[in-house]
Image: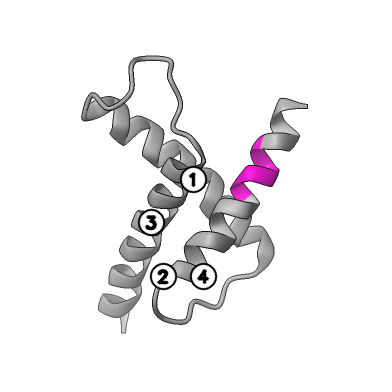
Amino acid sequence: MHILWTILAGLAAGFIAKALYPGKENMGWIVTTLLGIAGSFTATYVGQWLHFYKAGERAGFIGAIVGALILLFVYGLIKKTAK
């Protein structure tokens, strides 16, 4: 059941991050879900590295959105340099 909630939270975080990020990314809902889940992992590990979170503590929903925004920014940089 925990995995299902993680997927649903990732989906919501990914959609919110895509709505907040300026620009147009052509991503389907599966990639958006993966973006939100990866954003949560990014926020957790970067937060632990910066000592915002203790070891074993996870980033919350807002942290997942921030992590997804960071990943969208990096994706935009990679996409821009590939052209």
Q: Which residues are magenta?
A: 6-10
Q: Position of residue 33 (x, y in %)?
A: 62, 54
- Element at label 4: helix
Tell me the tag on residue 71: 3
Q: Amino acid at mark 4?
A: Ala
- Residue drawn at 41 percent across, 70 percent down: 21
Relative to 4, is 26 on the left or the right? left
Which residue does the numbered mark 2 point to in the structure image?
Answer: 21
Badge 1: residue crowd in 10 Å (few <14, some 14–19, many ≥20): some
Residue 68 to residue 59: above or below: below
Question: Mark 3 or mark 1, which is nearer the start of the sequence?
Answer: 1
Measured in 3D between alpha carbons, the distance from the residue under mark 2 to the one under mark 3, in whole angstroms, is 11 Å
Tell me the tag on residue 38: 1
- Residue drawn at 65 percent across, 69 percent down: 28
* Magenta residue check for 11: no
Badge 3: residue crowd in 10 Å (few <14, some 14–19, many ≥20): some
